[in-house]
Amino acid sequence: MDSSIFRIIVRVIHSSGRSPGLFLSGLSWRILERILDLLPLLAVFFWLQNILLSKGDNDEAEASILWLAGTLLLIFLIQLVAAWKGQRNSFLGGYRIMAGYREQLLDRVHQLPLGVLAEYRTGQLADMMTDDIQRIENIFTHQVVELLTSLLVPLLLFIALLWVDWHLAIGLMAGFPLALLFLQLSRNLFIRVSQAKQDALRYTSGMVVEYVTGLRTFRLFNKAGVWLKRLYLQFDHITRTSIGVEIWGAGPVVLYRLLTELGLVAFLTLAAMQIAGMTPAQDQTELLSLLLFILLAYRMLGPLLEMAEHLAVLRFTVQSEQKLQQLYQRKPLSEPGSAEIPRNNDLIVQDLSFGYDNESLILDQLNFRVPENSMTAIVGPSGSGKSTLMGLLARFYDPQQGSVSLGGSDLKALGSEQLYQKVSMVFQQVQLFDGTIADNIRIGRPDASEQQIREACKAAWCDDFISKLPEGYNTRIGEGGSCLSGGERQRLSIARALLKDAPVLLLDEATASVDTETQYHIQRALSRLAQGRTVIMIAHRLSTIRHASQIIVLDQGKIVQKGRHDELLACEGMYRTLWQAQEGQHQSSAAS
Ligand SMILES: Nc1ncnc2c1ncn2[C@@H]1O[C@H](COP(=O)(O)OP(=O)(O)OP(=O)(O)O)[C@@H](O)[C@H]1O
């Protein structure tokens, strides 16, 4: 049948690191309880058969009533024990496995390379850790029992029916293979359409966020109508994909039920033919068998009909588990047994090649050296690999070939603790958490005093705006620092780096997308931060790197030029082209 559910169970148990003993024992008890449900019917059947065969012997009838009552009571008691043990063990075992699974997943997320973490949208990981896990938990606590019983109970009943009358049993199951085949064939289509719906929902929610956040600009530029039209089209697309999911989700289930019930028609016709051929005297016990058969047949069809619905629900769970499995399969970065200590703060990039996948190289054979206490700027057109290179210098990923070393030690041999003690980063996307301003800055040095925090903020030119906030340094800044402007967030991250006082500094686009006055303040704060450190910065405004000790020009993942500003300007090449383009822009904006 659908093997994915069993694969999921095995995978989840394996990943959880917990013993499945208790859960499996609970599962067995719960299945036993469902099977015992059938026994009273069989007991009554044998009792009736006995009565008919005893032909009015009163003593025997009395004894058999006692036998029947005793048997029914015994079945009831065993069922009671099975139900109690089943519920207790399966819930306890299931929840323990899921607790282990959650812990392991959290550990895995904790160890994921920072570059991989950045690939997930805000909230996406949280959804996976809550909603998707909840669905998987449901398998352990509810769905697996339902599914197994809807498979096992009909199987056992079918064996019993074969024993009572194999012609009728085969007739009863006439439509089932076809029903099953249809269900299985529709499975892949269903998965495809529901995947398409998920993609459409994700894309639309991105569009809605863009629309809402950019609404003011769109209205000012008279573009809100265009956006609305695009959104309406996208909503139409969601409607169409949703209908596809219903057609391929609910449609096959209905057809499966109809085809399975087709067997009932064949079976009832055969049964009617048998009854019509019976002579009354001869066949009282056979009539009884037929009656039992009909009762068992209905008991068998019930779970078989429900099975398709369980499988439909499970397909969503399978998708959740596959998402989490992909997360599990991302390899954490290796950590050294004993971390090396860097001898100095020289950074050396040697034969470095890197691609996000195995198909295309984003960086190709890079070689350069950043001496201690010097500034290196990385420039190049959009998409040339600047941020990727910065990510490798910060060990967000490991390179496929070559190495990055600090103070003579490969970053892999330093380990993340050593590395992040030595390196500070001020990136375009400033990561702030929901806490006070002081907490956010103190993360650079947890033991810093209030005075030290204030000094770092003064040096980063952010003390002014912090002091004007209602609770000063104790103001909560909301998730992601949403109540601060872009320039304020950047200055906070500079203060954080100043407080941390690490000897190596990685800067990425720190002056992008802010007005001239803010840019001036940020620039001053950055100059302060850069003093006496080894600095590598991505620069878009070439005027800010005229005094850099070294400029590296990247194009399509390769270093095409290397040198100081004057040297690069003196010769033909990409740097001069970029410089002239920016100069031209300045002159035309000054003229207008
Ligand atoms: N996480 C990722 N997965 C796959 N490809 C990526 C990823 N990040 C970047 N790329 C690709 O790598 C190439 C280099 O991108 P990168 O962001 O490093 O360039 P960049 O020079 O910093 O560009 P920009 O100046 O526009 O920021 C691009 O083709 C980009 O599409």
Image (cartoon, rainbow, N blue to C red):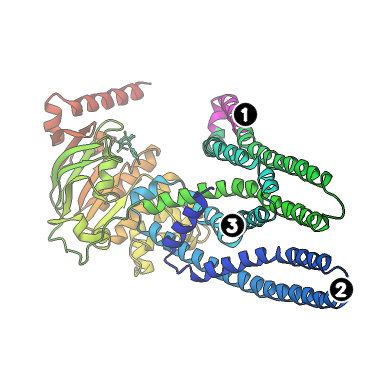
Query: Can you give x and y, in whole percent of width and height, for residue 63 in the image?
Result: 81, 78
Depth check: give the residue in front, 171 or 150: 171
Query: Can you give x and y, in whole percent of width and height, for residue 162 in the image?
Result: 65, 53
Q: Quadrant of residue 576?
A: top left
- Tell me which image quadrant ligand 1 sits in: top left
What distance separates the C-alpha of mark 1 from that of mark 2?
76 Å
SS for callout 2: loop
Q: Is residue 235 magenta?
A: yes
Query: Residue beneath label 2, please?
Result: 57
Ranked by sequence position, the earlier of labels 3 and 2 is 2
SS for callout 3: helix
Mark 3 vs mark 2: give the one in front. Answer: 2
Q: Residues within 10 Å of mark 2 (few under 14, many from 20)?
A: few
Residue stretch in magenta: 217-241
What distance separates the C-alpha of mark 3 from that of mark 1?
39 Å
Q: Residues within 10 Å of mark 3 (few under 14, many from 20)?
A: some
Q: Is residue 54 left or right of residue 9?
A: right
- Residue 484 appearing in the image: no
SS for callout 1: helix
Q: Which mark is residue 236?
A: 1
Query: Can you give x and y, in whole percent of width and height, for residue 336 in the image?
Result: 22, 62
Q: Which residue is at 73% across, 73% downward?
A: 76
Q: Residues within 10 Å of mark 1 (few under 14, many from 20)?
A: few
Above or below — where is 174 with respect to 138?
above
- Residue 573 appearing in the image: yes
Q: Which mark is residue 148?
A: 3
Q: Which residue is at 47% across, 53% downward?
A: 7
Q: How many marks?
A: 3
